Amino acid sequence: MPELECAFPQVVNNLAPCLAQGGLNADLANFISILLGVVLVAALPLATLLILLVVERKVAARVQDRIGPNRVGPYGLLQSIPDALKMMTKEDITPAGADVFIYNLAPIIAFASVVLLWAVIPFTPLHIGADLSIGALYLIAVASIGTVKIMVAGWSSNNKYALLGAFRTIAQLLSYEVPLVLALLIPVMIAGTMSMQGLVEAQRGMWFFFMAPVAAIMFFIANQAETGRAPFDLLEAESEIIAGYNIEYSGFKWGMFMAGEFMHAFTASVIFAVIFLGGWIGPGADQLPILGFVYLGAKTVVVYIFGLVLRATVPRVRIDQLMSFNWKFLVPLAIINVLVTALLLQVVNWLGIAPQGDAASDLIANLPQTVVLLLGNLAVMGTVSTLVRNMGRQQRLADEAVEADTEVEELAHAAAH
Amino acid sequence: MLELNVQTLAFFVFALFVLGGGLGVITTRNLVHGTLYLILSLFGVAGFFVLLSAPFLAVVQVLVYIGAIAILIVFAVMLTRSMTSLHEVVNRQWVLSAIVAVLLFVMLTVTIILPVWGQDGSLAGQPVSEVVATTTDLGKALVDGNQYVLPFEVASLLLTAAMIGAIVIARDDE
């Protein structure tokens, strides 16, 4: 048996063999290693949450020309800690007539459904919870558990606002799952794999953002809706349904819903960075895996901050606008996009300009394919925006004609008297 | 003789989920609790797929079945008068239903489990993933002109027709 290096940096990667070398049962050593990995992967989003809350409030404050939290710690960075303490010491209320067991179950499902997503996120070339062969599908499947928590919370609260809010939220989440899945299909088609690590590897030469900008933008919009971020934050439209499905929750249980929501928004940014911005890909990431983690973090922050600024800028849409935007615009566009991309990929193969073998990680070798796909995407964008503009103009002209008619009628009416 | 390892243990836990959840579905008087028991049961089935090294089927199980439970609750809320204190109603068709259920069970056993075990039980020891086709085979079979492309297309046409029918029924007359 070769002597293993069990000093600090190496022990992270060789924990199980090192423990076994120290005289531990091999099965037990494996179990401890896996358990530690699971705890680490699950704890990472929790730790980032404390920072996320401050970042969110700071960015929103800056957009609205305020300073934001600035009392606790340097620049208000420790604001989350007193907030969390306050939340935990609040009274825990269970409404009369609530279905107690599943009322308590809902916050746990809410939190778990987000933490589960982190199992397939590749942090570095070496570190990933589980590199499933169907990683991308796993993301969708776990996200679909999210609808269960909303319905369970809304129903068990024994409150009509909660139930109505839950109905509305379910309609939104299910609708936006369609463009989300269709947008996710494009990178899978280009890479030819659903494994998350495989998707990142396929972007060595060129990020998918440049090959499939339509899919990327659609994925971002659908994710904003899935995570309930403005302009799609109808999940908690205070002025209409008070607070939505979690209206009856208080104290720590409400905190779990809120933490789940914040983490989901951040996780969506991480997934966007992994699937469209190349994940851990960057100079030197193969030699020094920790650099990959830094690259992934940097890309995620860019996406996340963009989402925050968007959230603080745009007003909320109405529910009918939300639905017609999805079903009459995003879904048809997503289907067309899938067809166009499939066709272009065949054309690329037929022309023989798809990068082969080792060339796949080369920027120059990827350029012809990227240019073809990018042109196709731009054509789709151009066609769609022209169509939408023409439809808008016709609508406006029709409206004006109706208005003019009514004016003439009113004048005639007035003249008759 | 059963070997007691992690796989066996997991199998029994999942079996408990499936059977316990199924029992819960048919015994509870509360529709929402029933749907939650159904989640437990379906989750156990997904676990079986993982144990059989069929991750694709496991994920589809979660996506299609557990993901749709929320819709089931919506229907339960909208289409029933009382969700929490259902009382059982047995009609005269229960004998027929029982016969159909038993026949279905026998048919599934004969047509699916026996071929996997082999005629003389010789295949029983092997992992199922080596006996039956993989996900890649499944995907290819569904779009191969010599295999199942026609049934696949017919099924998708049927689903489209069902969806259009549902929309037509749901629309108000204009």
Image (cartoon, grey):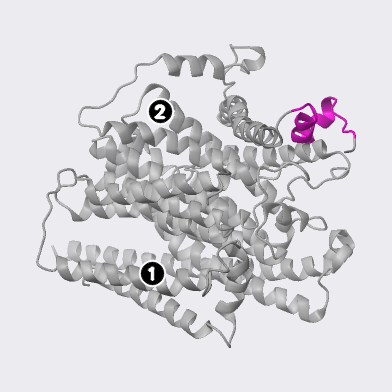
The residue lying toward the viewer, choosing from A364 and A31, is A31
Total numbered labels placed on residues in the image = 2
Q: Residue furthest bottom?
A: B146
Examine the image and state in which quarter residue B71 appears: bottom left
Residue at 45% in and 15% down: A86
Q: Could you tell me residue A255's position as x and y percent?
A: 44, 26
The residue lying toward the viewer, choosing from B58 and A406, is B58
- Compute the Cα span from label 2 to label 1: 48 Å
Residue A187 appears left or right of B163:
right
Residue A284 appears left or right of B62:
right
Sequence-wise, the earlier of marks 2 and 1 is 2
* Circle 2 chain: A
Residue occupied by mark 2: A254
On whether residue A374 falls in the magenta region, the answer is: no
Q: Could you tell me residue A274's position as x and y percent?
A: 69, 48
In the rendered structure, find residue B15 and report the number of the disc placed on it.
none
Q: Is residue A410 visible?
A: yes
Residue type beneath disc 1: Ala
Q: Main secondary structure of the magenta part?
A: helix
Q: At numbered mark 2, what does the secondary structure look like: helix, strand or loop?
A: helix
Residue at 49% in and 64% down: A331
Q: Could you tell me residue B21's position as x and y percent?
A: 34, 48
Residue type beneath disc 2: Trp
Quadrant of the image containing the C terminus of chain A = bottom left
Residue occupied by mark 1: A398
Asked if the residues shown at circle 2 and circle 1 are in contact, with their CB atoms under 8 angstroms apart, the answer is no
The span shown in magenta is A3-23
Q: Estimate how packed mark 1 is, as few (under 14), some (14 to 19) or many (20 or more) residues with alpha carbons within 10 Å.
A: few
